[in-house]
Amino acid sequence: MFIKLKYIFSVVIIFLITGCGITSPQLTTTNFKDKIDLILRDSIFDASQVGIKVVSLKNNRVLYSKNEKLLLRPASNLKLITSAAALSVLKDTFQFRTEFYFDSLTSSLFIKGSGNPLFTSEDIAKSVSQLKSNGLKQINGNVVGDISIFDSTQWGEGWMWDDEPFEYAAYNSPLTINNNCIKIITTPSNIIGGKLNIQTLPQTSFVNIINDGITSNSESPNNLNVTRKFYERSNDIVVKGNMKLNSSPDTTKLTVLHPEKYFVTLLYEELLRQGITIKGKPIISTIPNTAKLKYVHFQSIDSVLVNFNKVSDNLTGENLLKLLGKELNKNIGTTKSGINNVYNFLNKIGIDTSKFLMVDGSGMSHYNLVTAEMYIKLLRAMYNDKNNFQLFYKSLPIGGVDGTLSNRMKNGNAFKNVHAKTGSIGGVSTLSGYVTTSNNDLLAFSIMMQNFIGSAKEYRNAQDKICEILSSISDSL
């Protein structure tokens, strides 16, 4: 009987802590700390590090803290810093400009971008259509891309060489298109032993396809491998392995080398597609003073920031950082000048920038070091910024609803009540943002976990449990 009661008691305790599929009971400020402590006593934290801080935004009361001054790698939580600085420095009225010029002296078309990370092939098609409406019929010179507003460094400091050629490690550029990636769609042929069918999206001559893929019989396992020759610094796409007959199409998204040349090539091909004759070729150079502005494509910063934080787009972070650098030194955008501008913003809101390290705009680098305490200061400052808070808050993933939190916190009180930025690189998992309690109080929190081996799933689960506990607080803070 004693054993049975003990078993029932244990099940109830585990059920209350984990919130497995049901709404957690409401908690008071007198017992939620113990529940968080219990989560952090799990053996998964024996060899790892944790930094946490939680505050009430109503009265700045510290509700929970552990190692809040410990420097830890933020992963994509760094995007909170970049997006807050971009919103505060560039303002919510900022527009990314993609400018099209024509120079009558050389009969060349020029394109100059500002790093709009959402620009696509569809935007090129619309821009060319507009240029035609404005009278462009033929180009006797070249199609020229001007990338002079950014420096030539197109990857972040401390990024890992083996992140190539995956889409999350795209090269940054003022001329950015299709996330500076290309999709490779592979399907089997209709006969066993036949070459695989390969299509690129968009269709372009910019990449070279090396097709060594074979269609196999139904008994052979699929072992398809699609990659770019990144060791050789090449845009050769290599397809190897087998696909079974009647297999569904496989889509692989890869980065491209020299994205500015990719942009200009796609523009060149679209001009021809829409009937504009060109005698020259796609090249990279600078716009002469004699060139006249013919058309501008605009992209609002609000849509960029929402995409940046919701899907955790690294390319956006690096382009934004260089834009902030251009804003500071006026001549050319560099990562270093961008970070200096971020530091200027952080100093204004009372954050000591000598106490942490920032080397990129996305958090991909393992060199970045930030504290949970610093994130709380940032989140509190943005909350108090009445002009920018709503857009900043809107840009964050919502628990169980969208972005990188769409498949987390789908049950319980945390559902829809957590607006927070995730972060994940090797051995690192972070979550920082805002949570609404059962009493409708808004809390700022930062949870940073690192130095673990293997999957981050258990650490994300622990973060979700902590958010469930915080969202279940019922008494007034």
Image (cartoon, grey):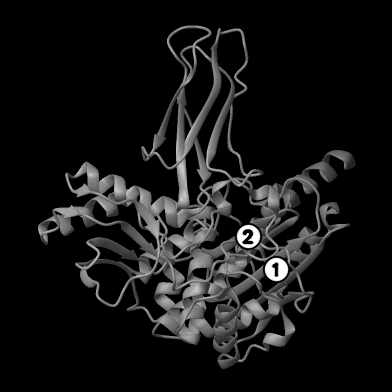
Q: CA distance from mark 1 to mark 2?
A: 25 Å
The residue at which mark 1 appears reads as 32
Disc on res. 423: 2
Q: Residue at x 88, y 40 (%)?
A: 3
Q: Is residue 477 visible to the viewer in this orientation of the structure?
A: no
Q: Is residue 169 visible to the viewer in this orientation of the structure?
A: yes
Residue 130, horizontal then vertical, whole percent: 16, 58
Quadrant in which the C terminus appears: bottom right
Decide: is 89 above or below 434: below
Badge 1 crowding class, 10 Å Cα cut-off, few under 14, some 14 to 19, many 20 or more, is some
Q: Earlier in the sequence, mark 1 or mark 2?
A: 1
Left or right: 336, with 145 as reference point: right
Badge 2 crowding class, 10 Å Cα cut-off, few under 14, some 14 to 19, many 20 or more, is many
Foreground residue among 342 and 71: 342
Disc number lying in front (1 or 2):
2
Decide: is 201 above or below 32: above
Left or right: 157, with 90 as reference point: right
Residue 138, horizontal then vertical, whole percent: 17, 53
Residue 162, horizontal then vertical, whole percent: 69, 48
Q: Residue at x 49, y 86 (%)?
A: 328
Q: Residue at x 41, y 81 (%)?
A: 90
SS type, badge 1 = helix
Q: How many discs mark residues in the rendered view?
A: 2
Identify which amino acid the numbered label 1 is placed on. Answer: Phe
Foreground residue among 361 and 257: 257
Foreground residue among 415 and 350: 350
Quadrant in which the N terminus appears: top right
